[in-house]
């Protein structure tokens, strides 16, 4: 496992610069993604999966006659289709999309965005004068968590303590089914019962579904390894900047060499929203 212990040594100056940079982010308009990728409701989910995988994004806005009517996510694909043994090419986007959209205005504060995301449990769509102008994900919020007292709380208070694992010899298909059934975005991959890597829903989209690659491959061959971990005493703010620096959305937490939990981008947003 790759450990992140001495943050100032591994990321010299990153945290100090981040504290200064975060002060300029005051409103939703400062952090939202303005490039919103859309799809029609009558398109099949295999095409939706291909688009999300190729663009390395986790959601698509569903449009009917140039009007936003819903959203589909990588989690929908896992839980509603793959976990139930359905074929993506046989399922229309409209049949599994979530509606209505969770809306917020561009002048809303970052704190308000975090609270709305935590309460509604979903990505935020940004509307201005009735027009869709952006989207905000948990990762967008994590990259810009302000320098606030809430973010100095320890991750151990917000992490998910039940970590789901799978052996390296398991197939990608079986791991995808586990993620879908449990509605989780990642599984820790083990070798001889020791954590060695991680496989995520984004890996499934980008490396398999987007490329029509068979899911019969052993997950150990494609898991991200070595596993990046951090100690339980780090703060929410430190965890956010590890994720940002390493371009990850999940960070396994260890204590005395043992894996005791995992903190996700959504967990960090919930911590800040308190």
Image (cartoon, rainbow, N blue to C red):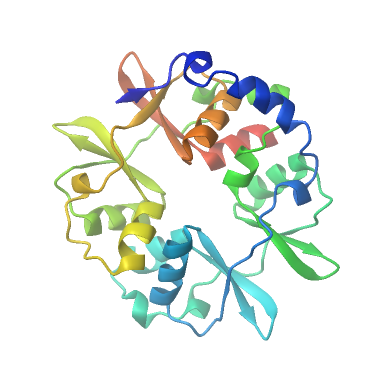
Residue 152 lies in quadrant: top right
Q: Say whether residue 145 is visible.
A: yes
Location of residue 211 with respect to 184 vertically, above or below: below
Q: Residue at x 45, y 60 (%)?
A: 74
Tell me: 250 left or right of 193: right
In the image, residue 198 lies at what x, y percent?
A: 32, 40
Residue 143 lies in quadrant: top right
Q: Residue at x 37, y 46 (%)?
A: 186
- Furthest residue to the front? 12
On the rendered image, what quadrant is the C terminus found in?
top right
Location of residue 250 with respect to 52 vertically, above or below: above
Residue 160 lies in quadrant: top left
Tell me: 208 left or right of 202: left
Q: Say whether residue 76 is visible.
A: no
Q: Residue at x 67, y 66 (%)?
A: 101
**Number of numbered discs visible in the structure rendering:** 0
In the image, residue 70 lies at what x, y percent?
A: 61, 71
In the image, residue 219 lies at what x, y percent?
A: 21, 49
In the image, residue 210 lies at what x, y percent?
A: 36, 66
């Amino acid at each position: 496992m790759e450990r992140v212990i001495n943050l100032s040594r591994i990321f010299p100056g990153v945290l100090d610069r981040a504290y200064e940079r975060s002060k300029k982010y005051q409103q939703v308009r400062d952090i939202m993604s303005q490039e919103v990728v859309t799809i029609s409701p009558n398109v099949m989910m295999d095409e939706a999966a291909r688009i999300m995988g190729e663009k390395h994004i986790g959601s698509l806005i569903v449009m009917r006659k140039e009007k936003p009517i819903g959203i589909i996510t990588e989690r929908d694909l896992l839980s509603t289709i793959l976990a139930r043994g359905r074929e993506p090419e046989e399922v229309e986007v409209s049949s599994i999309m979530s509606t209505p959209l969770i809306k917020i205005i561009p002048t809303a504060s970052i704190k308000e965005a975090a609270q709305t995301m935590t309460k509604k449990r979903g990505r935020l769509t940004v509307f201005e004068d009735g027009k869709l102008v952006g989207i905000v994900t948990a990762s967008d919020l994590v990259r810009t968590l302000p320098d606030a007292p809430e973010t100095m709380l320890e991750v151990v208070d917000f992490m998910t303590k039940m970590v789901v694992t799978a052996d390296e010899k398991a197939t990608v298909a079986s791991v995808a089914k586990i993620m879908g059934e449990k509605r989780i975005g990642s599984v820790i991959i083990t070798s001889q019962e020791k954590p060695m890597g991680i496989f995520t829903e984004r890996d499934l989209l980008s490396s398999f579904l987007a490329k029509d690659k068979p899911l019969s491959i052993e997950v150990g061959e494609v898991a991200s390894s070595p596993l990046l971990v951090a100690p339980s005493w780090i703060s929410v703010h430190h965890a956010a900047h590890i994720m940002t620096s390493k371009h990850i959305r999940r960070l396994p937490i260890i204590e005395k060499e043992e894996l005791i939990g995992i903190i996700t981008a959504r967990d960090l947003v919930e911590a800040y929203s308190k």
